[in-house]
Image (tube, rainbow, N blue to C red):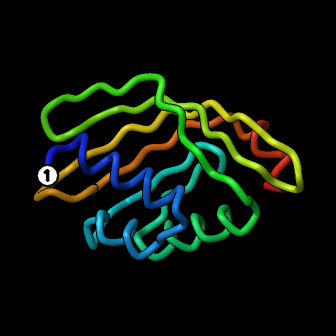
Amino acid sequence: MTHDDLLDRLFAAISARDLDAVASLYAPDVQVWNSASRRTFDRAGSLRLLDAFLARTSVVRYERQERRHWEDGAMQRHILHVRAGGSDHEIDVCITFAFADGLITRVYEYVDGRALAPLGW
């Protein structure tokens, strides 16, 4: 599986609310950092955070703006389209990834925390 395939599967799984599929793409020791919380989460913590995010939204869709690759890593910039509380929101996000053995090992997610306020974060 290419890194593009891996990322396509990740964002499709999140959009489909399939946390088991997300977990299958993470390395057991994955570390996920989020700029809004300024915290790093392990695999279980990241999945809990993602579950809480999905519980607040009824629609999640990614509009990819850019994706770049380098050896064992990639960056994706996208607009995250969500519906929460009956309103649609667009959130600009940039994420960098590290890969090993066909799995995601590191995630660094950059998002303006103010953009998450309408979602109750």
User: Which residue lies at the image location 50% right of the left edge and 66% below the top edge?
Assistant: 46
Looking at the image, residue 33 sits to the left or right of residue 92; the answer is left
User: Which residue lies at the image location 32% right of the left edge and 43% below the top edge?
Assistant: 97
**In front here: 20 or 94?**
20
- In the picture, the quarter occupied by the C terminus is bottom right
Is 111 placed above or below 65 here? Answer: below
User: Which residue lies at the image location 39% right of the left edge and 49% below the top edge?
Assistant: 107
- Indicate the quadrant where residue 101 lies: bottom left
The image shows residue 89 at horizontal and vertical percentages of: 77, 39
Is 36 placed above or below 25 here? Answer: above
**In front here: 37 or 19?**
19
**In front here: 80 or 28?**
80
The image shows residue 40 at horizontal and vertical percentages of: 49, 58
Q: Few, some or many C-alpha atoms within 10 Å of disc 1 (few <14, some 14-19, many ≥20)?
A: few
* Amino acid type at image mark 1: Met
Label 1's element?
loop
The image shows residue 84 at horizontal and vertical percentages of: 81, 54
User: Which residue lies at the image location 56% right of the left edge and 34% below the top edge?
Assistant: 93
The image shows residue 77 at horizontal and vertical percentages of: 47, 29
Q: How many marks?
A: 1
Looking at the image, residue 24 sits to the left or right of residue 99; the answer is right
Looking at the image, residue 65 sits to the left or right of residue 4; the answer is right
Residue that label 1 marks: 1
Is 106 placed above or below 95 here? Answer: below
**In front here: 13 or 99?**
13
